[in-house]
Amino acid sequence: MPEFKNKTIFITGAAKGQGKAAALAFAKEGANVAGFDLGEKISYPAYNRANGKDLETLALEVKAAGGKFAAFTGDVRNAKDVENAVDGAIKAFGSIDILFNNAGVAAYGLSHELTEEQWDAVLDINLKGAWLVGKYVIAQMIKQNSGVIINNSSVGGLRGFNRLSHYCASKWALTGLTKSWAIELVKYNIRVISLHPTGVNTPFNDGLAELEGKTREEVAEASAGNLQSVPWIEPQDVANALLFLASDKARHITGSQFILDAGLLTK
């Protein structure tokens, strides 16, 4: 029997990159997938262009992989959007067993030159959005007396990076949120983990290249700080880690930081 037969995973930022890889990986293991991402009328910064059409494409791919899919559009910063999506997932599948809090953005800028709007956008999406989704999903997991929450942090949640102070601040805070949730929720058999990948080879990097006025290859070269000789890891590497962390094989992992960094933090 597939590992996650009759289980439901709720994924934010599901339409592309790491979220899409996770959706397909869990679908192949029998999971129901609730994918939450941007709607056509929601404007995020240029470096994240996912929309309702991307979710439609993902729905077809999940079904082709043998899974069931429910799409929800909205803004992770908006409580009503999140509540509607979570309620919709529960109505569609009856439970939410796994949450992959994946939605996030980044942009370069020296800390003292950032605008208040730039700071707020990154903190609100990366941190407030994760908390808000968790707020509604946790209520369902408590009713079930079970669940796994994986917050997608970053190596930037374990160290600093030049021109990414707002991003690193949001990811360090996500690590703290993870540990606090783990303490609060252990009595309900809910595990909480933060995942810390190095740079991942996703369309996200195209947007960063555009913001920098560089090619994708130049961004890759600038990102090449890993101990292993790869500038980025692949979305499937992240999906493989998620499959392990959400499984019973990881039943004693909670409140921890799971590092997937190609050796970057050895430096």
Image (cartoon, grey):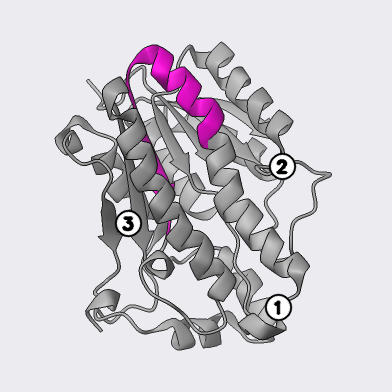
Identify whether 78 is placed above or below 207. above
* Disc 3, SS: helix
Amino acid type, residue under disc 2 in the picture: Lys
Q: Earlier in the sequence, mark 3 or mark 1?
A: 1
Whole-percent x, y for residue 222 in the image: 47, 88
In the image, residue 207 above or below residue 193: below
Q: Amino acid at mark 1?
A: Leu
State which quadrant residue 97 falls in: top left
Nearer-the-camera pick, 23 or 77: 77
The numbered mark, 2 or 3, whose residue comes first in the sequence reads 2
Sequence-first disc among 1 and 2 = 2
For the N terminus, the quadrant is top left
Residue type beneath disc 3: Asp
Residue wearing tag 2? 53
> What distance separates the C-alpha of mark 3 from that of mark 1?
33 Å
Seen at 24% across and 78% down, the residue is 228
Mark 3, mark 1: which one is toward the viewer?
1
Cα separation, mark 2 vs mark 3, equals: 25 Å
The residues bearing labels 1 and 2 have C-alpha atoms spaced at a distance of 32 Å
Q: Residue visible at 53% across and 61% down?
A: 170
Neighbourhood count class around disc 3 (C-alpha, 10 Å): few under 14, some 14–19, many 20 upward? some
Region in magenta: 134-153
Q: Which residue is mark 3?
A: 237
Quarter holding residue 113: bottom right
Kindly indicate whether the residue at mark 1 contacts the one at mark 3 (C-beta within 8 angstroms). no
Q: Secondary structure at mark 2?
A: helix
For mark 1, does the 10 Å Cα neighbourhood hold few (<14), some (14 to 19), or many (20 or more) residues? some
| In the rendered image, the vertical position of residue 164 relative to residue 143, given as above or below | below
Q: Position of residue 144 (x, y in %)?
A: 38, 14
* Residue, disc 1: 114
| Callout 1 secondary element | loop
